[in-house]
Amino acid sequence: MDYEAYLQSCQSPFWQRVFQHEIAYLEQQLAGCRRVLSVGCGPAIIEAELARRGYELTGLDVSAQALSCAPDSVRTTAGRAEEMPFDAAVYDAVVFVVSLQFVDDYHAAIDEAWRVLRPAGRLIILLLNPQSAFFIAKSGDLNSYIQLIKHTDNEAILAAVERRFKTKTEYCLGIRETEIFKSSEPTEAALFCITGERMASG
């Protein structure tokens, strides 16, 4: 993947608006957290803004090339979500910002998130919503990153999360062509969001 071109495309007004909505959602869910791990962070665009707002951010990504584009404000580590190179119980929150569906084994990634979280730590997962007009439109674009998606059964992902976390779910981020708006309608909301509190055992 050409991350320089990706970074350039991320500067478009549309994607900047998307990122601001995602950052606002994450910040709301991260209330009370300090140490945050973002799994599949890529060049850490959203993570950089969260770090600027005072969170202690670590970014994990399988691509060293992507991490080379990340800002110095985010600590970065190259590695797989299924085998996180971190000690147990060190993070207040683990977030997957539209990344878990691209991981080979999401069961192992969820287990690893549980392991590295402190007791009652927080899990935040933003998933692409295959029912949405946004997803359907992107699926028809052979150049879209959605072509790389490996898992589209969000209910199966939720069931895997529920083994180890007390969960809440919601649809958010309505997208209609270039318009962005609040929506909880499955046909309009581009994201299916899972938030969870780490259970003592699972």
Image: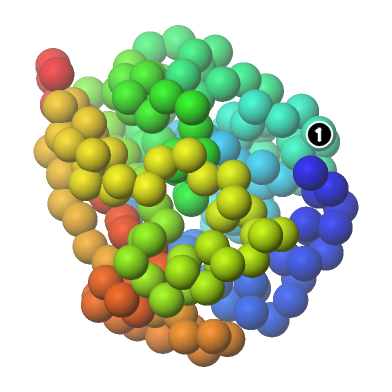
Q: Is residue 35 left or right of residue 5?
A: left
Residue 71, position as x, y percentages in the image: 76, 45
Residue 113, position as x, y percentages in the image: 37, 26
Along the viewing direction, whichever of 197 and 180 lies nearer the viewer: 180
Quarter location, residue 197: top left
Q: Amino acid at mark 1?
A: Gln
The answer to whether any part of residue 86 appears in the image is no
Q: Is residue 56 left or right of residue 142?
A: left
Name the residue at 71% across, 59% down: 143
Q: Dot 1, how many residues are within 10 Å of its Cα: few (below 14), some (14-19), or many (20+)?
A: some
Vertical arrangement, residue 4 with respect to residue 93, above or below: below
Residue placed under numbered mark 1 in the picture: 65
Vertical arrangement, residue 187 with respect to residue 56, above or below: below
Residue furthest out toward the bottom? 179
Residue 98, position as x, y percentages in the image: 48, 50
Name the residue at 32% across, 59% down: 192
Q: Is residue 31 left or right of residue 79?
A: left
Q: Is residue 71 left or right of residue 159?
A: right
Name the residue at 23% across, 39% down: 156
Name the residue at 31% across, 76% down: 187
Vertical arrangement, residue 172 with respect to residue 108, above or below: below
Residue 105, position as x, y percentages in the image: 42, 24
SS label for mark 1: helix
Quarter location, residue 18: bottom right
The answer to whether any part of residue 74 appears in the image is yes
Applied colour scheme: rainbow
**Considering the image in quadrants, where does the N terminus appear?**
top right
**Considering the image in quadrants, where does the C terminus appear?**
top left
